[in-house]
Image (spheres, rainbow, N blue to C red):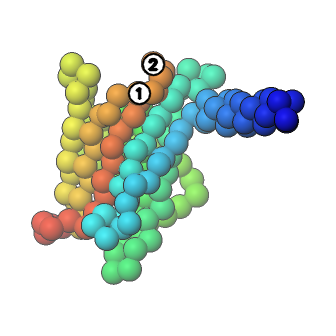
Amino acid sequence: MRQEASWQRIAVFTVAACLGTATLGHAQLFRPFTDRSRAMLEGNWQSCREADGQYAERVYDGRWPGMQPFELHMGPYHEFALFRGVQDEHRMHNSAENLLHPFTVEVVGNNAKHVWDVNGIHLEVVLAGGSREDCESWFVTLSRSKLSSH
């Protein structure tokens, strides 16, 4: 009985260690926490430094009823971008096609927040700190804008 309990503990610790190691290997992670009744996208976005020293980026393809398709770029680091349409090629955040101005969120005293209302979309990002020193963690909320898109 004691030997069986010992093997169970070993199995639990092994699985936990494997999951922990797998999590550390991800340079970017988005954890949603919405039922989508209020927001199209709501969650925690984490951009971590990769082996080459660059921060990770994630591109969200938005295809919502009643809206034109769009791309939301989260990261790298403090950058965000919103583009009309969806395409496979990466787009530069400093291009004129980026609807978000400014596209780099300014951090002052470890605090940052920015809100954009553009093209019928309301985007709010708030710096949440990092789980590790080499990560930037953001709360992201994307919803339909209540303002005119003009």
- Image quarter in which the C terminus is found: bottom left
Residue at the spot 41% in from the left edge and 27% down from the top edge:
130
Residue 17 falls left or right of residue 104: right
Q: What is the residue that sits farthest to the bottom in this orientation?
A: 66
Task: Specify the amino acid type for callout 1.
Answer: Gly
List x then y, in percent, for residue 3.
87, 30
Residue at the spot 48% in from the left edge and 61% down from the top edge:
61
- Image quarter in which the N terminus is found: top right
Q: Where 133 sits versus 92, above or below? A: above
**Which residue occupies the foreground of this view, 103 or 125?**
125
At numbered mark 1, what does the secondary structure look like: helix, strand or loop?
loop
User: What's the CA distance linking mark 2 and mark 1?
Assistant: 6 Å
Q: Are marks 2 and 1 in contact (CB under 8 Å)?
A: yes
**Which residue occupies the foreground of this view, 13 or 67?**
13
**Which residue occupies the foreground of this view, 22 or 74?**
22
List x then y, in percent, for residue 46.
45, 37
Q: Which mark is residue 73?
A: none
Q: Quadrant of residue 45?
A: top left
Q: Which mark is residue 130?
A: 1
List x then y, in percent, for residue 50.
59, 26
At numbered mark 2, what does the secondary structure look like: helix, strand or loop?
loop
Q: Which mark is residue 133?
A: 2
Task: Specify the amino acid type for callout 2.
Answer: Glu
Q: Where 91 sits versus 136, above or below? A: below
